[in-house]
Amino acid sequence: LILDGEAIALRSDGAPYPFQDTMRRFGRVLDIDRMRAVMPLSVFFFDCLHRDGEDLVALTGAARFAALSAAVPSAMVIPRIAAADLATAQQFYDDAVARMHEGVMIKAAGAPYEPGSRSASWLKVKRAHTLDLVVIGAEWGNGRRRGWLSNLHLAARDAASGDFIMLGKTFKGMTDTMLEWQTRELLERAVTQPTWGVEVRPELVVEVTFNDLQASTRYPAGLALRFARVKGYRPDKLPADADTIETVRTIYAGQAAPHSTQAI
């Protein structure tokens, strides 16, 4: 029997722990028994690849899901539905997010299992947040982005002090046209130019989408953006209009372990 699944740590209310907390359970050589008691792992399966001597990877998803349900207890199978319409799928997604999961996986019932690759037959749908942040620096790109300032240093505004507090970086979501424009604009605003890039006057506001926040000792904010990507610059906004660090902390306080997925 060969199954595909994941091990996650659940709170007493059934909500998953944050990903970074769950990862503390893996690769440990000390305090294993204590961590097992404090943060027990639960295993959930979402696919069946081999059963009773038969290779199932070429079968349809529907056939593999049926084999999975026959092979393991229902409590160990990721919840799923066969959605006949968008409203049903939306309700399933909303319920998953309400239970503090990251989102859902949408899978084509007629598709085979494709190990080691991503295709249109599997689609992860996750909730996202958006913030207007200030660019305080950028790093030179590599490869085809060599010669462009690519990796942006992003900061939220401290309403009390007026300072800008860094809480992450991103190089995702930018077109070549945007890279060319921002390289020119950031160089014009450079305060210092270390070998890695530039530190700039906090004058440009950028709209950033991200999945969630995690605690971090790496950044002054004590928080870090996860899976951040740029939607676009906001020339209509001044730095004083950017989102505050208090807003960021409110988002973090309101999120609860969004790091498991359910399947449709």
Image: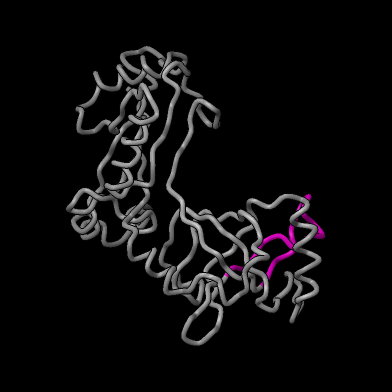
Could you tell me which residue is drawn at 33 percent across and 42 percent down? Answer: 94
Q: Quadrant of the N terminus?
A: top left
Is 264 placed above or below 55 here? below
Is residue 181 found left or right of 133 in the rendered image?
Answer: right
Colour convention: one colour
Could you tell me which residue is drawn at 35 percent across and 13 percent down? Answer: 53
Is 64 placed above or below 247 here? above
Could you tell me which residue is drawn at 64 percent across and 74 percent down? Answer: 136
Foreground pick, 51 / 209: 209
Foreground pick, 33 / 218: 218
Is residue 247 found left or right of 199 in the rendered image?
Answer: left
Q: Which residue lies furthest to the front in this view?
A: 236
Q: Position of residue 134 (x, y in %)?
A: 60, 70
Is residue 4 rendered magenta in the image? no
Q: Position of residue 43 (x, y in %)?
A: 27, 39
Q: Position of residue 162 (x, y in %)?
A: 54, 84
Foreground pick, 136 / 145: 136
Q: Where is residue 192 in the image (x, y as percent from the top left)?
A: 74, 80
Is residue 184 found left or right of 243 in the rendered image?
Answer: right
Is residue 146 rendered magenta in the image? yes
| Quarter residue 184 falls in | bottom right
Could you tell me which residue is drawn at 76 percent across and 73 percent down? Answer: 195
Is residue 148 found left or right of 18 in the rendered image?
Answer: right
Mark count: 0
Q: Residue furthest bottom?
A: 161
Q: Specify start and end residues of the magenta stretch as a single range.
A: 137-154
Q: Quadrant of the C terminus?
A: top left
Is 228 placed above or below 219 here? above
